[in-house]
Structures are given as structure tokens and as C-alpha cells.
Amino acid sequence: MTVPVPAEIREHTNIRFMKKFKRYEPMVMDHSAIIQAKTCFRKYFYRIVLGFASRKREQYFGFGSCYHKFREILEREWMNDPRPHTEKVIDQAFQMQCFGNAVAATRTLWKTLGMRDPVVGDKWDFQTEARLVESCAVAFKHWQKEKVQNRIEVIAVEQNFVVQLPDGEYIGGKADQILRWNQKVWGRDWKTSSKTQDAYYTRTLDPNDQFTRYTYGEQALCGEPVQGQLVEVLFNAKGTKSDPKKGPTLHQHLANRSQSQLQQWEKEQIVFNKQLALLREEDTWPMEERSCPFCEFHSVCTKPSEAAQMAKLEAEFTVQPWNFLSREVDD
């Protein structure tokens, strides 16, 4: 059996809608691609099938990507040192070296992505390079404490996985970490958010396709039960007069998944795959109007003809085929 690579493109045999555009729909479906379809099939068609993306990189995407890079390099620096854990825990100079290298990698990515500090008054004006480095320092202190406690063993960092479902379709993902905690395997996912943590994240842990999908994929990868995801959220928000600085702070949440939940998710994903197969067969991608107020493609859908919609896509968007292994894509 040949496992497709994440960038491998699915063949579309009945192209009837927007014929002049090439199809880029990947063979391996990750959470972010599927959630586009669950939000709106037409949005999925524009972004995942045709590969169109906004020309402007939103500040929060770049900020989150840079923070991920810090956490990745920090852990890799630790893992690459062959000394026993006990020796590394008491070596403060080594830990500061890990921190320095991780911050340097983060700042390099900030420049590579073309990131700039937003102008004062912008919605995201708190997401500056200085706030990013301050956030890294807060995460570093948390990381140091975790290493001292020595209850969590990190098995893998930025681990890719591709898994075949019973219907023959493939799912994939990039796990931030796979770890062993209290002798059991978990995944860990790093998030950045400006939402109020306890009020917002508690309601998003379950149901949550990403956390279930990653648990399913990591379990197939590891060959033993995976308990769920440790969700670690870096909180930063725009200040107010009464509270001029909100964050950075770290909040931890558990997204447990039972074997029954994983089995049910598998059944539902297979049904959803059948829906997508029908849309490809008909080359018809229905709109979901409830998503319009927040959709970057709204201006496209308002055009009165197929030709006008295609012209709008070409004028305002760029082709950036979806590949979940790249931090260049929007998450």
C-alpha cells in the first residue's frame, strides 16, 4: 500500500464549475481543511480545492506560528542534549542557552514571514515582537518548572502523521508534541488566543474535531491508547484603561477522549467523506449563509455570475495550495 504524501493532489474527473481553475485538493485531509468544509462547502471549494488564500497574512496567524517555533526549538534543544535528565535540570546555563536559541529561531521566523508590529489602534496592536518575546519568557518559566517536576516525558515534537480510515481515505496532521504523562500517552497542542480562557476554551474542548482527530492519528502512530490532548493556551489580549495589560499567561486544559468517542468519530468522518465525494462528483459546492459575516470570501459569493466570481478570486486572492505540514498556510 502506498501512503500519499500530504501535498499529493486528488484527481477531479468531472470539472464543470469554474473550469479554468486548476484543482489542488489534497489527498490527505487534516483538521483545518475539514473544518473549512464543515463551516461552508463553498469556502472549502475556494480555499482547499482551488487553493485561493488571502493576500494579507493576518497578524494573529504569524504571531501563533512564531510562538510554535519557539516551543519547538526549545524542546528540541533539550532533547538533543544526551546528558541524563537530572544533569540538565540543574544546569541553568544550558537551559538559558536553550531559551536563547529558541528565541533566536522565533525572531528569524518573524522576519522570514514579513511580520511587523501593528500600528497603534489596530485590533491586534498588542501582538508585537516585544510581546512575542515576553510570551516566550513566560512559556520558558512554565517549561522549566515542568522539567523540574519530571512527570512528563516528551516523546516527539512537531510529529507528522498520515493514517488511513476504513473507507480508504487518509487523514493527517502535525502534532505539536506526543508525550508520556503518568505512564500514559497524550498529545499536546499549543494554542495562542485573545479569548477569555476559562469561559471560552472549556466549551471548545469537546466536541472538537482537531483534538479527536489528533488523538485518533497519534494512537495509530504509537500503537497504544492515547488518552487525549493536553491543550496549553497562551493568552494575550488588548488592554483597557482599567486593565492596561492582559497577558501573557498560560492556561492548561485537558481534552480527554475515550475509545468509544474515537470509534464514533471514525464513523462520522466516513459519512462526511461520502458527502465530499458527492460534491466532487457533481462539482457543486453549496453555500452556508450563516458563515458569511465572518468569511473572507464573502465578496466573491456576492457576485452575480460565475465569471464575475472567478474574476474576483483572481483580483483579490492568491493561489496557495493547502499543505498542512507548512506553517505558511493559515491555520
Image (cartoon, rainbow, N blue to C red):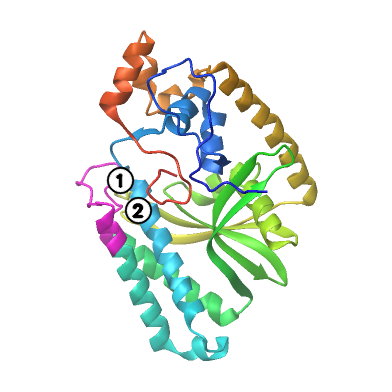
Instruction: Give the residue displayed 53% in from the left and 48% down from the top.
Output: 5
Residue 330 found in image quarter: top left
Q: Is residue 168 visible?
A: yes
Label 2 neighbour load within 10 Å: few <14, some 14-19, many 20+: many
The correct choice, above or below, for 139 with respect to 279 in the image is below
Q: Position of residue 321 (x, y in %)?
A: 41, 38
- Depth check, front residue: 205 or 313: 313
Q: Position of residue 276 (x, y in %)?
A: 60, 27
The correct choice, above or below, for 194 with respect to 283 in the image is below
Q: Which residues are magenta?
A: 108-130
Q: Are marks 1 and 2 in contact (CB under 8 Å)?
A: yes
Q: Position of residue 36 (x, y in %)?
A: 51, 33
Q: Main secondary structure of the magenta part?
A: loop
Q: Secondary structure at mark 2?
A: helix
State the separation of the CA atoms marked 1 and 2: 10 Å
Residue at numbered disc 2 = 63
Instruction: Give the residue displayed 61% in from the left and 44% down from the top.
Output: 171
Residue at numbered disc 1 = 124
> Mark 1 belongs to which amino acid?
Trp
> Mark 2 belongs to which amino acid?
Phe
The correct choice, above or below, for 187 with respect to 103 in the image is above
Q: Secondary structure at mark 1?
A: loop
